[in-house]
Amino acid sequence: MNWKKTLIALFIMIPAFAVCTPNIATASTVAGDQNRDVSFSLEIKQVPGNLAIKGLARNNLHHKIYQLQLFAVVLDENGKPSGNEAVFIGPASLALDQSQQFNLTLPGNLSMNARNIRLEYRYHLPDYAERYWSWTYGRIMITPEGDSKS
């Protein structure tokens, strides 16, 4: 195995950890920090029958990321996915310091009683030879009680 690829994988594949303190009814928070790969600014609102998550995803890496995808997943009281999820597929590429707005809507019946919402993201990074693509993952836990887990 190439030692450069191993080092790059160790530093790039570290998941983004965040501190956010939203109230599910109406919330505005910043998740992630400028030292992470992707940071988020979120607003969470209860709308009739649904839970709406609006936000901004920002690329903090020193190079482009490709095919940013976001997944919002409602977790039950045991921390297991409830089956309610929303997906956002971003632009083909996102340059350094470039931001992308996103909107996610979670179905209402389970999301209204959600104990946790997990915002997951992934994106592609080409290797230096640009022959192979690999996914880089991260996740943010949003809890109504105001504490956050990564």
Image (cartoon, rainbow, N blue to C red):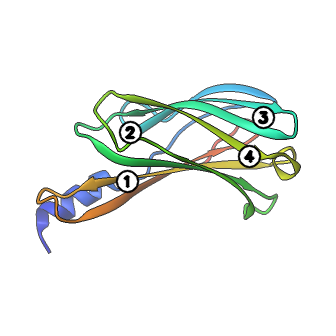
Looking at this view, is 19 or 69 the one in front?
69
- Where is mark 3, residue-wise? 24
- In the image as oriented, which residue stretches furthest toward the bottom? 1
Q: What's the CA distance linking mark 1 and mark 3?
A: 28 Å
Q: Secondary structure at mark 1?
A: loop
Could you tell which of marks 1 and 2 lies nearer the N-terminus? 1
Q: What's the CA distance linking mark 3 and mark 2?
A: 25 Å
Q: Secondary structure at mark 3?
A: loop
Could you tell which of marks 3 and 2 lies nearer the N-terminus? 3
Task: Name the amino acid, label 2.
Answer: Arg
Q: Is residue 2 left or right of residue 27?
A: left
In the rendering, at what x and y percent does residue 130 appear?
A: 16, 58
Task: Name the amino acid, label 1.
Answer: Ile
Could you tell which of marks 4 and 2 lies nearer the N-terminus? 2
- Where is mark 2, residue-wise? 36
Check the image and report above or below for 29 versus 6. above
At x 81%, y 33%, the residue is 46
